[in-house]
Structure formats: C-alpha cells, structure tokens
Amino acid sequence: MDRKFFSDRWTQDTSWRPKHTQVPLEKWKARAAAIETEADDLRSLVQFHMLRRDMSYLEAVIRESATDLDAYIQHQIDEIRGK
C-alpha cells in the first residue's frame, strides 16, 4: 500500500490495540446456539442483544478497514486517470 496516502491515518492509530487476542467466532457461534435453545423468550432477547453488542466491535473494525481499502483503491484509480 502507498504509505504516503495512509501516513496520517497510521500515525493517529498507533495507540490502538485489538480487543480480542484471538478470533472469537467459535465462542460467538456457541452463544448463538445457546440463544436458539433458550426457553425464556425475554432471556433469549437479552442474550441476543449482548451477542450483537460484542460483535459490533469487530464489525466496526472490519467496516473501517474496508472503507480504508476502498479509499486506497479509488486513490490508485484516480492517479492512473490523472486526477
């Protein structure tokens, strides 16, 4: 990647640390399965809300990275087109 294009972004994010030290997908799958088998509807809604809340962190990180990648690709296209 073009470091010049992202240099400001990289210097801003130097203090960032990931929330998870390993991929939490298996734990999330187990929690989703537990929600499916929960007999109490209210409790299952609370569990679902907590699972979505926990997943939203990773979703936001992935969305931000995808946006950065899209911006980089568009930057490269613009350079090729002479913009």
Image (tube, grey):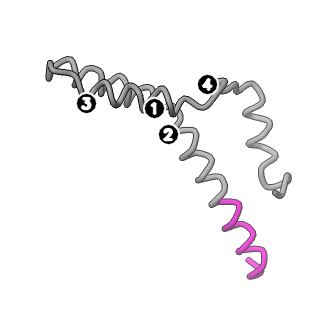
As rendered, which of 52 and 65 lies closer to the eye? 52
Q: From which residue to which does the magenta span run?
A: 71-83
**Cα distance in 3D space between marks 4 and 1:** 11 Å
What residue lies at 58% left-to-right and 45% top-to-bottom?
Answer: 64
Q: Residue 36 carries which label?
A: 3
Marker disc for residue 59: 2
Q: Where is residue 2 in the image (x, y as percent from the top left)?
A: 83, 58
Can you tell which quarter of the image residue 5 is in?
A: bottom right
Q: In this view, does 6 lie to the left or right of 49?
A: right
**Pointer 4 with pointer 1, Cβ within 8 A:** no
Image coords of residue 1 (percent x, y) = 81, 57
Label 1 or label 3, whichever lies nearer to me, is 3
Answer yes or no: do the residues labelled 1 and 2 have beta carbons within 8 Å?
yes
Mark 3 secondary-structure assignment? helix
Q: Please identify, in this view, whether the residue under mark 3 or under mark 4 is nearer the observer.
A: 3
Mark 1 touches mark 3? (CB < 8 Å): no
In the rendered view, tell whether residue 73 sits above or below residue 44: below
- Looking at the picture, how far across and down is residue 48, in whole percent? 30, 27
**Magenta segment: does it hold 79?**
yes
Kindly state the secondary structure of the residue where label 2 is placed.
helix
User: Residue 8 got which mark?
Assistant: none
Q: Is residue 36 magenta?
A: no
Report whether 67 appears left or right of 31.
right
Residue in the image at 63% along x and 47% along y: 65
Closer to the N terminus: mark 4 or mark 2?
4
Which is the main secondary structure of the residues drawn in magenta?
A: helix
Q: Earlier in the sequence, mark 4 or mark 1?
A: 4
Give the label on residue 55, or none: 1
